């Protein structure tokens, strides 16, 4: 999995704590989908073409739910003009999004 050191450190800290406050699942589902859309990734297509299994999709949304940067993410989405090369800085699922984007490009899905 592609990941920056800071993203990996956040992920490891999250895994070390057995109890994490989780954000609203619906809100984070839509945040994840929206970030993916802004960077040009069609998650519905990734699922339908077998590049993203539903269980992995759910796990990514659950990781997103642990992110303390919801307001920053929403601001990024509001100011992105509908197009960006990468997810917002500090995004806990940026590595997952980058990996999916790389996979879809290599398979010529988009």
Image (cartoon, grey):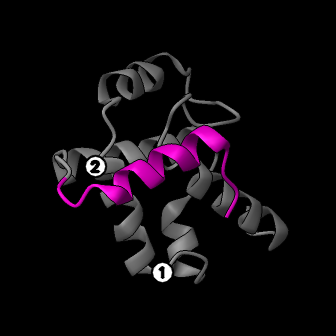
Q: Is residue 47 above or below residue 36?
A: below
Give the number of the mark in front: 2 or 1: 2
Q: Main secondary structure of the magenta part?
A: helix
Pick the residue in front: 36 or 64.
Answer: 64
Pick the residue in front: 15 or 94.
Answer: 15
Name the quadrant of the C terminus: bottom right
- Residue depicted at x 20% and y 51%: 20
Q: Is residue 82 visible?
A: yes
Q: Is residue 36 left or right of residue 58?
A: right
* Residue 49 at x, y percent in the picture: 60, 81
* Residue 93 at x, y percent in the picture: 49, 50
* Residue 47 at x, y percent in the picture: 51, 75
Q: Is residue 63 visible?
A: no
Which sits earlier in the primary sequence, circle 2 or circle 1? Answer: 1
Is residue 88 within the magenta segment? Answer: no
Name the quadrant of the N terminus: bottom right
Other residues around mark 1 within 10 Å, as few (<14) / some (14–19) / many (≥20): few
In the picture of the structure, the residue carrying the numbered disc 1 is 53
Is residue 6 within the magenta segment? Answer: yes
Q: Residue furthest front?
A: 16
Pick the residue in front: 92 or 83.
Answer: 92
Q: Is residue 99 left or right of residue 23?
A: right
Q: Secondary structure at mark 1?
A: loop
- Residue depicted at x 41% and y 61%: 60
In the picture of the structure, the residue carrying the numbered disc 2 is 65
Q: Which residues are magenta?
A: 1-19
- Residue depicted at x 42% and y 69%: 57
């Amino acid at each position: 999995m592609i990941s920056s050191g800071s993203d990996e450190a956040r992920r490891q800290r999250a895994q070390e704590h057995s109890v994490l406050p989780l954000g609203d699942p619906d809100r984070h589902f839509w945040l994840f989908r929206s970030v993916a859309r802004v960077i040009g990734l069609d998650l519905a297509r990734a699922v339908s073409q077998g590049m993203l299994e539903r269980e992995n999709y759910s796990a990514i949304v659950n990781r997103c739910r642990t992110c303390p940067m919801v307001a920053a993410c929403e601001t990024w989405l509001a100011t992105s003009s509908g197009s960006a090369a990468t997810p917002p800085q500090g995004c806990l699922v940026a590595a997952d999004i980058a990996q999916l984007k790389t996979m879809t490009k290599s398979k010529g899905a988009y």
